Image (cartoon, rainbow, N blue to C red):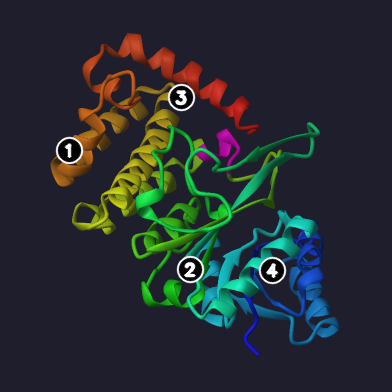
Amino acid sequence: MQKLLSVAIPCYNSQEYVRHAIDSLLPGKDKIEIIVVNDGSTDDTQKIAEEYAGRYPGTVKVVNKENGGHGDAVMAGLREATGLYFRVLDSDDWLDENALYIFLGTLKKMKDSDDPVDLIITNYVHENVLEKRSCSINYHENLPINRRFTWNEVKEFKMGSYFLMHATTFRTDLLVSCNMELPKHTFYVDHLFVSYPLVHVESMFYLDVDLYRYFIGRADQSVNVKIMLQRIDMQIEVNRHMIYDLDIKNISSASKRDYMYYYIELISLVTITLLLHSGTKENEELMESFLDEIKDKKPDVYDRMMRKPIYRHPIRPIRILPHFICYPVYRLAFRIGRRVLALN
């Protein structure tokens, strides 16, 4: 019998928390395929994963591979997936048990319908464990709740809201058929994991439960601002892939096209704001050259960024206002945004 869900857990030196991630999935073990991808760990991650595989045969499988980074581990998990749906669980995160039961019930209905939707969206929760605070992210303002729908019913997203990887569960055969490839040794590829298949998504279902628990607060975490600045080249690389790999202007659905343009604009804004936040002349020049590059090579994307009123689009002011006016404002907005999103 095909399982309802395959969950890939990419792991690199995850011995301190991978047990929690696996344990959070075990309540649904008869319906879930857990794929632990050991991405060249040098600690006891492999030993722990194989322990679980021995205790739960038919539920937990282990993929051991050379280190290739998060995206490469996700792709290794997808190649092993046999469930109807596929999602990623980072090794330091977990799924809520009560929400998981509801989620699996929805997947069962999808399977029984013989016409499962392409994408299921659920809520996720920022869990800043060190500061003992959390922030639930939902899509109440954007999507019909607890029913099937198409892009025509998706409402415009406010700046900062989007389909994060933690909110998405794709039909496995759709992920395979879109021939997605994620770059090796690159952080922030979760945006590519969402955007590549999203172009092919036609039907969706929004299940209004807080399923995914997103751990925030470790100093070495990839979303730590200092770490992001150190890896700004990877952020730019992912941003470029989104801009150049997706043929958005030829998408027939206007709502889907609008969302994909918006998604690119949002990730570009993150890139630009990080470059400005660094405060260096070199990164300010890199920011300007990056926008010039988009203007020259992808004028449709650039025009979308520039044609909105200044008060509705935060990238446009950089191109029309003096730097000494807009740069301090961006840095302040960056600090406020981090606190609102419960980032560190």
**Label 4 or label 1, whichever comes before in sequence order:** 4
**Label 2 or label 4, whichever comes before in sequence order:** 4
Q: Which amino acid type is shown beneath numbered disc 1?
A: Lys
Would you identify the image quadrant in which residue 244 lies?
Answer: bottom left
Q: Which residue is mark 1?
A: 295
Q: Are marks 3 and 4 in contact (CB under 8 Å)?
A: no
Residue 161: % across, % down:
49, 38
Inspect this view and state whether residue 335 appears. Answer: yes
Residue 295: % across, % down:
17, 38
* Figure quadrant of the N terminus: bottom right
> Looking at the image, is 209 positioned above or below residue 289?
below
**Label 2 or label 1, whichever comes before in sequence order:** 2
Q: Which residue is mark 4?
A: 105
Q: Secondary structure at mark 2?
A: loop
User: Which one is in front in this view, the residue at disc 3 or the one at disc 4?
Assistant: 4
- Spatial CA distance of label 4 from label 1 is 47 Å
- Spatial CA distance of label 2 from label 1 is 36 Å
> Looking at the image, is 256 positioned above or below residue 280?
below
- Region of the chain picked out in magenta, as a range: 223-228
Q: Are marks 2 and 3 in contact (CB under 8 Å)?
A: no
Q: Which amino acid type is shown beneath numbered disc 3?
A: His
Residue beneath the point at 65% across and 81% down:
3
Inspect this view and state whether residue 240 appears. Answer: no
* Direction from residue 186 to residue 86 in the image, left or right: right
Q: Which amino acid type is shown beneath numbered disc 4?
A: Gly
Q: Secondary structure at mark 3?
A: helix
